[in-house]
Image: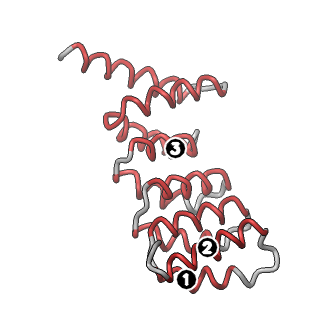
């Protein structure tokens, strides 16, 4: 084993342990920085760590920064999580890594009770660029409860999808 491989292997183990046992934001930030920089080698262990249910949103962010398509099914699953922060993090990850496979789940999130989740879903739908989303987005505009910023984002997304700009 080369010395760089050994450094990566040890750093990966240490960062995963730190994230798994994190009890402070600083520990999470240190682990996040290390895992993002380790990159590809961290993808499978991070996906496995999602099963623990801890730090899902943080893990989605790390996986999105790495950019491996293996993470996309995890993001799609996260769109249906009971935690609004996990749903938001999953949608945010899909903005960075848009995938047509996520469209159905994102369209469901357009009806989420949380405005942050809805807004992230709109942005992810825009990143995918499929005009199929125009109809459900148009329905969103009918909601009286839509906040002004959200309404503008939805209208802009509809306009861009209709123009073929995503």
Q: CA distance from mark 3 to mark 1?
A: 27 Å
Disc number for residue 134: 1
Label 3: which residue?
Answer: 61
Note whether 150 is above or below 137 in the view shown.
Answer: above
Residue that sits furthest to the left in the current view = 1
Question: In the image, is 7 to the left or to the right of 76?
Answer: left
Element on which disc 2 rests:
helix
Note whether 113 is above or below 164 in the view shown.
Answer: above
Q: Earlier in the sequence, mark 3 or mark 1?
A: 3
Residue that sits furthest to the right in the current view = 144
Residue at image coords 24%, 21%: 5
Characterize the local packing of mark 3: few (<14), some (14-19) or many (20 or more) Cα atoms within 10 angstroms.
Answer: many
Label 2: which residue?
Answer: 156
Q: CA distance from mark 2 to mark 1?
A: 11 Å
Q: CA distance from mark 2 to mark 3?
A: 25 Å
Question: In the image, is 48 to the left or to the right of 149?
Answer: left
Looking at the picture, the colour scheme in use is secondary structure
Question: In the image, is 12 to the left or to the right of 109?
Answer: left
């Amino acid at each position: 084993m080369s010395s760089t491989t050994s450094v990566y292997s040890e750093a990966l183990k240490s960062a995963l342990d730190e994230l798994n046992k994190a009890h402070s934001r600083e520990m999470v930030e240190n682990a996040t920085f290390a895992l993002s920089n380790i990159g590809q080698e961290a993808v499978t262990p991070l996906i496995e760590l999602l099963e623990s249910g801890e730090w899902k949103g943080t893990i989605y962010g790390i996986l999105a920064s790495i950019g491996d398509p293996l993470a996309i099914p995890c993001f799609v699953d996260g769109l249906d999580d009971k935690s609004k922060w996990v749903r938001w993090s999953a949608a945010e990850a899909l903005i960075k890594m848009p995938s047509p496979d996520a469209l159905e789940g994102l369209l469901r999130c357009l009806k989420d009770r949380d405005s942050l989740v809805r807004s992230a879903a709109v942005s992810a739908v825009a990143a995918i660029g499929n005009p199929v989303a125009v109809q459900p987005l148009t329905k969103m505009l009918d909601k009286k409860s839509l906040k002004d910023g959200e309404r503008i984002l939805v209208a802009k997304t509809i306009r861009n999808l209709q123009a073929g700009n995503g």
